[in-house]
């Protein structure tokens, strides 16, 4: 019995060391030969587990050679899996030629099974992978049990069960360690990418900022020129167009800067009722120009936590889109009230609406159906609301109108 446990522990640690080996090798970015080293480690583990099998008193022997095959096949490559099986069969020929046919058939079946599930295995969850390990283990255990009964040692089944359980635990732990290592590496890559992206966007933001100053100068001179009396009609038209284009560029840069601006994290208590009213008043002249009406029903004393400047920007974007969606006039109804732990702000327009496809693309960068659109307004708005812990729901029907509902946590 003691010998049995000793053997068990020995096998368990040898096999488990493969998992830690993987973690160690893969976490070190510099090791070029990690795959080769890992392959050697797998071979070594296979060699040891086959050379020192667990012996039952009836003379039966068991080892853990399944695990190196499993790991090589799924975590190195298919070829490596075949290689390990070839070595395994060779070793079997050396240590016990009588068992060679059975082993060859067993591992032939296992390889076929692995080949069949190779692709789904790569994309499935860790739990399912472990469940698969359990299944393969159960398969092997049943053939072993059959061998045990055949050889008249059926009474030893308890040993076999303990051994199989241990083998399953070892395999699960290795799968878990390897999967977690891979996950960690993936997260590290993503972090690097995000950092690089953030650095680039900061640079871009400073460039955009620098462009604004000369543009203001150009705009000023253009305006002076526009005041000149002896300009031809054409010259006047060109200057007007240039001014419009400059303004458009300015809007794009401002939008971009708002997007690239790092989250300042300012979380002041702000009077949402006042800000909403202010913004609507500010947009009113623009809406009259477009022959549209802003109708408001805003409860008093709505307050939230956040950045007043940012939330104003969200309202302006949505109102502006609503006005632009009603080329032949109409109204936008704005309702704001408390709903549970949230302030609910609804903007309903009677505009052209959106198709399902358009709705799905709303908020993606540079998605715009407008000739002079930037396609950044909604993206920024989604980003701001999300950072404030809220969310935006959009319902839209083509030809009928669109309703934006913003939920923001109450202060
Ligand atoms: P832009 O207004 O510069 O086009 P936005 O990000 O603000 O960019 O909006 C993206 C697109 O979403 C718009 O071009 C438009 O097609 C659609 N959209 C946004 N709001 C509405 C709305 N209220 N009604 C209909 N379509 C809208
Ligand atoms: Mg817009």
Image (cartoon, rainbow, N blue to C red):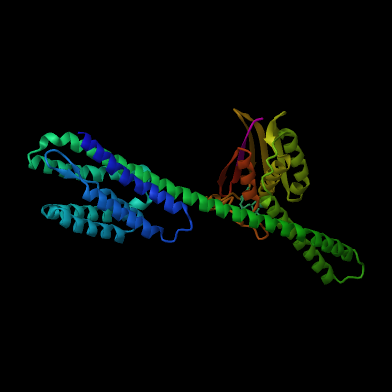
- As displayed, is residue 110 above or below residue 299? below
Residue 149: give x, y in percent of width and height: 10, 40
Q: What is the x, y in percent for residue 180?
A: 42, 46
Q: Residue at x 84, y 67 (%)?
A: 236
Q: Is residue 54 depicted above or below 238 in this figure?
A: above
Question: In this view of the protein, which residue sits in the foreground, 155 or 347?
Answer: 155
Q: Residue furthest right?
A: 229
Answer whether residue 375 is visible to the viewer in this image: no
- 242 relative to 394 in the view: left or right: right
Q: Which residues are magenta?
A: 404-411
Residue 313: in magenta span: no
Residue 340 occupies quadrant: top right
44 vs 353, left or right, is left
Q: Main secondary structure of the magenta part?
A: strand
Q: Horizontal placement of 373 versus 362: left or right? A: right
Residue 220 in view = yes
Q: Quadrant of the N terminus?
A: top left
* Residue 284 place in picture, x, y as percent: 76, 44
* Quarter of the picture holding the C terminus: top right
Residue 222 picture location, percent across and down: 85, 64
Residue at x-position 35% and y-position 49% = 18
Q: Residue at x 86, y 72 (%)?
A: 232
Q: Nearer the viewer, residue 357 or 119?
A: 119
């Amino acid at each position: 019995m003691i010998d049995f446990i000793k053997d068990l522990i020995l096998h368990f640690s040898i096999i488990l060391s493969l998992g830690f080996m993987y973690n160690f090798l893969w976490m070190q970015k510099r090791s070029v030969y990690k795959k080769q080293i890992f392959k050697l480690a797998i071979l070594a583990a296979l060699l040891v587990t086959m050379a020192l099998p667990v012996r039952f008193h009836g003379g039966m022997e068991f080892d853990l050679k399944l695990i190196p095959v499993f790991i090589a096949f799924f975590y190195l490559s298919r070829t490596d899996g075949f290689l390990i099986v070839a070595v395994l069969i060779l070793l079997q020929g050396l240590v016990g030629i009588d068992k060679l046919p059975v082993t060859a058939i067993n591992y032939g079946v296992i390889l076929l099974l692995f080949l069949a599930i190779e692709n789904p295995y790569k994309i499935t969850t860790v739990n399912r992978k472990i469940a698969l390990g359990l299944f393969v283990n159960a398969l092997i255990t049943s053939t072993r049990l059959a061998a045990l009964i055949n050889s008249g040692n059926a009474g030893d089944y308890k040993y076999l069960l303990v051994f199989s359980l241990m083998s399953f635990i070892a395999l699960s732990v290795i799968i878990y360690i390897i999967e977690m290592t891979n996950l960690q590496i993936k997260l590290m890559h993503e972090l690097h990418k995000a950092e690089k992206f953030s650095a680039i966007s900061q640079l871009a933001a400073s460039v955009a900022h620098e462009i604004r100053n000369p543009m203001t100068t150009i705009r000023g001179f253009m305006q002076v020129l526009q005041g000149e009396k002896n300009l031809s009609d054409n010259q006047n038209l060109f200057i007007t167009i240039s001014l419009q284009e400059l303004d458009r560029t300015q809007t794009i840069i401002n939008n971009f800067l708002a997007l690239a601006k790092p989250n300042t994290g300012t979380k002041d208590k702000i009077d949402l009722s006042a800000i909403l009213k202010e913004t609507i008043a500010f947009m009113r002249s623009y809406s009259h120009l477009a022959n549209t009406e802003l109708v408001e029903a805003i409860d008093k004393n709505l307050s939230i936590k956040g950045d007043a400047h940012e939330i104003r920007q969200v309202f302006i974007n949505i109102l502006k889109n609503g006005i632009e969606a009603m080329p032949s006039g109409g109204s936008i109804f704005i309702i704001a009230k408390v709903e549970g732990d949230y302030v609910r702000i609804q903007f309903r327009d009677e505009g052209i609406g959106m198709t399902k496809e358009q709705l799905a693309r709303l908020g993606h960068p540079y998605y715009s159906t407008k000739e002079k659109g930037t396609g950044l307004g909604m993206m920024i708005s989604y980003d701001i609301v999300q950072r404030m812990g809220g969310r935006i729901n959009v319902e839209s029907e083509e030809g009928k109108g669109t309703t934006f509902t913003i939920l923001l946590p109450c202060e």
